[in-house]
Amino acid sequence: MPAPSRPSDEPGPTFAYLLFGLTILIWGTNWPIMKVGLTLIPPFWFAFLRVGLGCLTLFGALLLTGRLELPKRTDLPVIVSVGFLQIAAFLVIINLAVPAVGAGRSSILAYTTPLWVVPGAILLLGERLRKLKLLGLLLGLVGVAILFNPTAVDWSDGDQRRGNLLLMLASLAWAVAILHVRSRRWQGSPLQLAPWQLLFALPILLLGALAFDPPWVPDLDWRLALLLLHNGVLATGLAYWGAFTVTRALPAMTTSLGFLGVPVIGVLSSALALGEPLTASVASGLLAILLGVALVNLSDLNRLPGSPARRKKR
């Protein structure tokens, strides 16, 4: 299958990796924030407010910079798939699961995306699994397996079982979105498409809130305002644009594995902010994930023009 066409404003590799790191940091710290927020706001309404604020942030930024455009017809499939799978479905599923599972563990299970993406990237996108990336993949998956230790989960608890399964389902929804984005030819930039993807998700989330959540009247205070500022403006408006950008600019296996850095930050920030235990198994799992992500990114960086590996071949 030929590689998808790329718009002229797509970022270079250096900026893409820097943006990748910032996105990981914002989303990682968002996990303990989500757990606190879900004690104040029902899950569908929380997702609706998050997406609504993110949508306003991106539409406002594009309007102020004169870059707001109607999406092209060829971009509609990407808007629909990302809006439904990566935004509406992913956010609702994790919001339903997080109250039953610790924030750190939730961040890990939601980001087991490589389990679903890697086979699809090889079979559907024709991506090659190089030795260094393979080693990174194995280390990353070992880290996830260590952290997803069945002996540390009360499998007799129905809420625990349901929460863990929902988080795995969320990772599957994101994986399908990643594969679809990488396989499509589309014209708009990630920044131009992101608000339309969020807008597509809004009515889905509103209908879900009206149908499934209990009646809710916001009790606005400074804590709720800060939670929504981080969760909506940063973790959705800015970080979703970052995620779309790096998903387009970097290989699918790199993004799926690199986003395992989110649970690393999620576990650490949950331990610091919520007092969740940082056990030996958690620490060893974190180390394996960090090494895996580093090797995956190194595999791609060594292929860039001007890298030490490229200079040695000359």
Image (cartoon, rainbow, N blue to C red):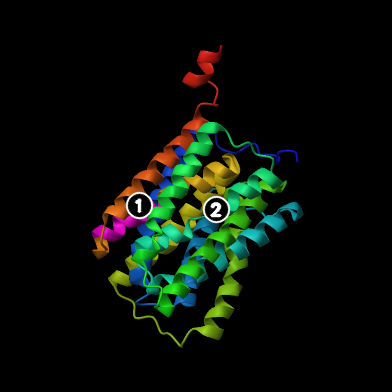
Q: Look at mark 2 in the image and give the residue it sits on.
A: 115
Which residue type carries mark 1? Ile
Q: Which residue is pictured at 51% across the width and 15% down the height? A: 311
Quarter of the figure that contains the N terminus? top right
Q: Which residue is pictured at 63% across the width and 57% down the height? A: 176
Query: Where is residue 59 drawn, in percent x and y?
Result: 55, 58
Which residue type carries mark 2? Leu
Compared to 39, does 289 lie above or below? above
Left-right relation of 267 to 77: left
Q: Which residue is pictured at 33% across the width and 56% down the height? A: 267
Q: Look at mark 1 in the image and give the residue it sits on.
A: 265
Query: Where is residue 95 drawn, in percent x and y?
Result: 45, 71
Q: Residue furthest front?
A: 151
Left-right relation of 67 to 97: right
Mark carried by residue 229: none
Q: Mark 1 Cα within 10 Å, few/some/many (few <14, many 20+)?
A: many
Tell me, yes or no, if residue 248 can be seen here. Answer: yes
The stretch drawn in magenta includes residue 271: yes
The disc, 2 or 1, on the residue closer to the chain's N-terminal end is 2
Compared to 142, does 86 lie above or below? below
Residue range in magenta is: 262-272
Q: Main secondary structure of the magenta part?
A: helix
Q: CA distance from mark 2 to mark 1?
A: 20 Å
